[in-house]
Image (cartoon, grey):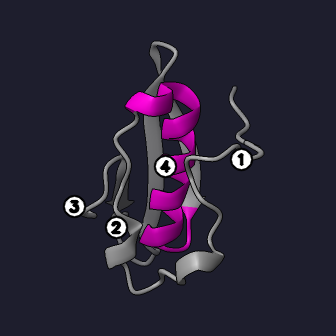
Amino acid sequence: MSGYKGVWVELPPPPRRSRIRAQIKGDGRCIRLGTFSSLFSAAWAYNVAALKYHGEFACLNDLTRDPDFIGPTLPPLREELPLQLSIK
């Protein structure tokens, strides 16, 4: 359990390393957002995708409680962002 919506840690059998993954449901299907190096970056990707697919009704992760949060240098999520999500 990661503590973030749409984010989970996949624990493969040793000797492989664990992976942090993110996904969202949108357009009637499950969309995998990728594998990430930190919970923070996976939660950020989920938030961007949530805004893309759900707009003003998106339930976003609270990233301010994460130690990787770097404050006002992050772009505001509610403004227009260039979405570079590859969807297959």
**Residues packed near mark 2 inside 10 Å, few (<14), some (14 to 19) or many (20 plus):** few
First in sequence: mark 3 or mark 4?
3
Q: Quadrant of the C terminus?
A: top right
The residue under the point 54% across, 67% down is 41
Query: Which disc is residue 81 wearing?
Result: 1
Q: Amino acid at mark 3?
A: Met
First in sequence: mark 2 or mark 1?
2
Above or below 45: residue 16? below
**Residues packed near mark 3 inside 10 Å, few (<14), some (14 to 19) or many (20 plus):** few
Q: Is residue 30 visible?
A: no
Query: Which disc is residue 1 wearing?
Result: 3
Describe the element under mark 4 as helix, strand or loop.
helix
Residue 73 % position (x, y) = 65, 78
Instruction: Tell me if residue 42 is in the magenta stretch.
Output: yes
Q: Which region is colored magenta?
A: 36-57
3 and 2 marks in contact (CB < 8 Å): no
**Residues packed near mark 1 inside 10 Å, few (<14), some (14 to 19) or many (20 plus):** few
Label 3, label 4: how many angstroms apart (C-alpha)? 18 Å
First in sequence: mark 3 or mark 2?
3
Q: Quadrant of the N terminus?
A: bottom left
Q: Amino acid at mark 1?
A: Leu
Label 3, label 2: how many angstroms apart (C-alpha)? 17 Å
Label 1, label 4: how many angstroms apart (C-alpha)? 11 Å
Label 2, label 1: how many angstroms apart (C-alpha)? 38 Å
Above or below 50: residue 41? below
Describe the element under mark 2 as helix, strand or loop.
loop
First in sequence: mark 1 or mark 3?
3
**Which residue is labeled 2 in the image?**
13
**Which residue is labeled 4 in the image?**
47
Which sits in the foreground, 41 or 12? 41
